[in-house]
Amino acid sequence: MKEPFLSALPIIEDIQEAGYEAYFVGGSVRDFLLGKDIHDVDIATSATPAELKAIFPKTVDVGIAHGTIIVIRNGQGFEVTTYRTETEYKDYRRPESVSFVRQLTEDLKRRDFTMNAIAMDKNGSLVDPFDGQKALKDKVIETVGSADERFQEDALRLMRAVRFVSQLGFRLEPETEKAIEVHAHLLQHIALERVMSEMVKMLDGPHKAEAFQILLKSGLYQYLPSLFSERDVLLTSLDYGVSTLNENQMWLLALHFSNTADSAGQLKKWKLPAKKIKALVRALDFLKQRIDHDWTAYHLFTAGRDSAVLVETVYQVIQHRPADSFVKRINDNFDKLAIKARDQLAVTGDDLLIWADAPGGPWVKELLESIIKAVLDGAVANDKQEIRRWIKTCGLL
């Protein structure tokens, strides 16, 4: 057993010493069995929230009505949830109420997929009543029990299934796949923020091409907001081999293929952060320029290294070419720039005002841009006096 399980072991031991059951559950157990990195662990227990509070002096109520509290130990928080069953779902997302139970199997029965319904005790022994280990071995995503019921209970599971295809490269079990097609329309009942969270993870997965195929085949794409709700965008993306692209590169590629006149508006529909929207819209402008011509030193400088790499990667995908060598060229050329940021320029607007002995105005910004271009092109060295002489020689001041 490895971290972060080891850090959480004392929590399980304290619960057991008090006379209750406690197990590691969910994604951390799945990822452990797959040999993947584990970041957080979840603990399920037969102890109720009130009983947990009696065991641990420091707790935080984060979802106590649904049986979840955070136990604080040595400054670190651990999420602990009471075994529970759930009543009928009214909004395709949350149960009307939950009931605490004492049996682990009853708790595992309510989970989404068999690979996520495996529990592990403090010694590493597994409790697997729904053959989740077999699903992992066979690389298949299947629901616990009836697929129709699981997706009707929580329609976000539709996107979670597709996301796991992208992340793990697993295939959908036939009944699970059929149920996604039948219940795709339920996705419209889910808050956009929750859908977006799954979409971002899907776009970052190494098997996103397979996930796109499922979005298309199932009809799920029709219930996504903008860009990826366009069938042509998905089909075109598949034609261009998107598996190596990260999330930001996928957003930029989608913007390019959509030919939308309102890029920012399309991204806002996904409730992306304003900073990310601004960066992507700016990158789209540079991509349009890159399609028209190769990078100049000034455009490379203006874009900045990160944006230039983003744009070049997507541009090469559009050209059906591997991007690695072209991205290396971008980095090499950026390293050679005489200046890499505006504050590295040897002169300032104040210098220009003093030299001109004139009031400020748009001319200051325009002249600074001319100087930057000249420095980047090698027409003048980035030295204050050299720049002053160059300005006079060119009659710019």
Image: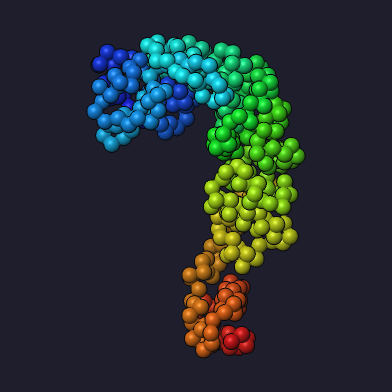
For residue 78, which quarter of the picture? top left
Residue 95 image position (x, y, % from top left): 50, 21
Report the residue at 69% width, 60% height from top.
Answer: 289
73 vs 342, left or right, is left
Report the residue at 63% width, 54% height from top.
Answer: 281
Q: Does 40 sit above or below residue 138?
A: below
324 vs 58, left or right, is right
Residue 263 image position (x, y, % from top left): 66, 51
Q: Quadrant of the N terminus?
A: top left
Choose between 308 and 176: the one closer to the eye: 176
Q: Does 342 sit above or below residue 364?
A: above
225 vs 56, left or right, is right
Residue 177 image position (x, y, % from top left): 66, 21
Choose between 129 and 300: the one closer to the eye: 129
Taking the image as drawn, is residue 135 in sight?
no
Taking the image as drawn, is residue 376 in sight?
yes
Report the residue at 35% width, 15% height from top.
Answer: 46
Choose between 381 and 18: the one closer to the eye: 18
Report the residue at 48% width, 16% height from top.
Answer: 86
Choose between 117 and 319: the one closer to the eye: 117
Q: Quadrant of the C terminus?
A: bottom right
Structure colour scheme: rainbow
Q: Does 273 sit above or below residue 141?
A: below
Total count of labels:
0
